[in-house]
Amino acid sequence: MMTIKKALWLLLLLFTVQISFSQENDFGMWYSATTELKLVKKLKLDFDINLRTYENASKIEEAFFDIGLTYKFNKYLSAAASYRFTEYNEKNDTFYPRHKWFADLKGRMPLGDFDFSARLRFEQRYKTFYKDENDKEPQEHLRIKPKILYNIPSFPVNPYVITELFFPVFNENKKDLDKIRYTAGFEYNISKRHSVELDYTFQRDYYPKVNDINIISINYNLKF
């Protein structure tokens, strides 16, 4: 019980620190459902659907699905490739398609009750709504996402913290970090196949100007 209390106090402290980073924030709700299907040994199919809101969760910002394959080299290292189709609410308040593909390298290292993991992702995005000529060019990012999860012994709820950094590549106008996310939350393992996650994310965009949003995410996971 003392261990659980310490984990709860740690997450509360992280929430407070993250919120203090910004004075005027937007608020959004993110909903997602993911599934994993084992195809053959070491290879699985990943699929998820997502809905994201903004402007105090009053408007839909985007709805999308991802589909991809993950190959597991061993229990520590895996690689993945996936495609995303998005309907995005553009600046004229109309939804237009966007396309994105990802290439991931994932590492994982369990140490006692802790699970340390990290994902290195390269992504390329294409718009179909063009406000200016620059929108016609694809945008590429390199994303680094370390995560620490604490497996509380004999307890189905496990807390985690995540940081994700977005670095633009192949773009002369944007050369530094242009987005960062801090996340803290819990996963609840209903069974071996079913789990849910609830977390809070503070996201800061630096380009074209500083823009902050606080996000509550709810995710359902299903494994076959």
Image (spheres, rainbow, N blue to C red):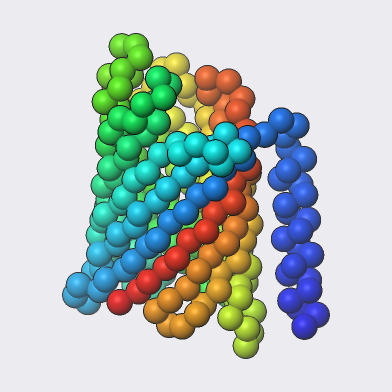
Taking the spot 56% from the left edge, 41% from the top edge, the residue there is 57
Q: Position of residue 210 (x, y in %)?
A: 61, 25
- The one nearer the camera, 167 or 21, is 21
Residue at (35, 14) in percent of width and height: 131
Where 92 sits versus 32, above or below?
Answer: above
Q: Is residue 116 visible?
A: no
Q: Which residue appears at 62% of the width and 61% of the height?
A: 185
Position of 147 with respect to 123 (left or right) is: right
Report x, y in % for residue 106: 40, 59
User: Is residue 49 visible in this depiction of the protein?
Assistant: yes
Above-or-below relation of 108 to 86: below
Q: Is residue 47 left or right of residue 215?
A: left
Q: Residue extending furthest left?
A: 40
Instruction: Identify the image quadrant of the C terminus.
Output: bottom left
Residue 142: % across, % down: 42, 39
Question: For the point 35% across and 74% down, which residue is it?
Answer: 223
